[in-house]
Amino acid sequence: MGLRSKDLLGLKQLTAEEIMEILDTAKMMKMVLTSGNKKTSHLQGKSVVTLFYENSTRTRLSFELASKYMGSASANITTSGSSVNKGESLLDTARTIDMMATDIIIMRHSQSGAPHYLAPRVKASIVNAGDGMNEHPTQALLDMFTLYEKYGHIDGLKVAICGDLYHSRVVRSNVIGLTKLGATVSVAGPRTMVPVGLDKMGCTVCKSVAEAVKDADAVMGLRVQLERQQKSLFPSVAEYS
């Protein structure tokens, strides 16, 4: 079928069918990888650039290795070693990369909506690896893939997500994606970390963790997003945990 858009900006833009196609493709690619063949030609002749304005270990490394495994020419840009430190704007940086005939830009940015801003302004495909407090679609796809591998389906599952719901872009993408695929999602967290209107996304906001995890098939724990907090929203990390 293929995706309708050249970009992967968020799970809001994907249909349930498109999400399942991604999960089925990931399943196939994992089989190739675990067979011992770490070099395929799926991205042969393509160039991939990871453009990260925030710190990352797992996400950035996963993309870098995946692009190399699939045969692409890949490069990594971080703000500490680029012209961003000279005052270059996000758009100028992206257009510079785009002019080098880059096919895919995988980006992470602290500003919500940054990938959406760039997508219509460059020829390269934009993959959102996290934008502010908005979405983290690729992490949510990985979470859904884990459930898909475990149960063989997502429709009908009950998933509980607990922790810092207010600052987490992961919870937003997971609620969107899981409910599109027919799962029931319950969430819980400290009162100061539960955003107003989260229930309107299709999940059930519970008053306690015990209520959220009751009869759950899977439980997801979210860390405290200290880097996004302007002030402390709980007494201590020990009490949070």
Image: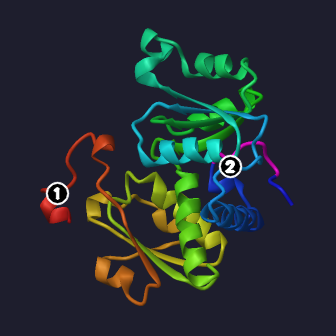
Near-viewer residue (67 or 238): 67
- Position above or below: 20 against 173: below
Mark 1 and mark 2 in contact (Cβ < 8 Å)? no
| Residue that badge 1 annotates | 237
Sequence order check, earlier mark of 2 and 1: 2
| Residue 188 image point, x, y percent | 35, 71
**How was the colour assigned to the protein in this rendering?**
rainbow
| Residue 180 image point, x, y percent | 66, 70
Q: Looking at the picture, which amino acid does disc 2 mark?
A: Lys
Q: Find residue 101 and report its image quarter.
A: top right
* Residue 165 seen in the current view: yes
| Residue that badge 2 annotates | 39
Mark 2 neighbour density, 10 Å: few (under 14) some (14–19) many (20 or more): some
> Mark 2 against mark 1, which lies toward the viewer?
2
- Position above or below: 43 against 143: above
Residue in the image at 72% along x and 68% along y:
24
| Residue 223 image point, x, y percent | 31, 58
Residue 5 is tagged as none
- Position above or below: 197 against 217: above
Q: Does residue 215 show up magenta in the picture?
A: no
Near-viewer residue (7 or 99): 99
What are the residue bounds of the magenta stretch? 4-9
Q: Secondary structure at mark 2?
A: loop
Q: Looking at the picture, which amino acid does disc 1 mark?
A: Val
Residue in the image at 49% along x and 13% along y:
83
Quadrant where the C terminus sits is: bottom left
Residue in the image at 59% along x and 76% along y:
149
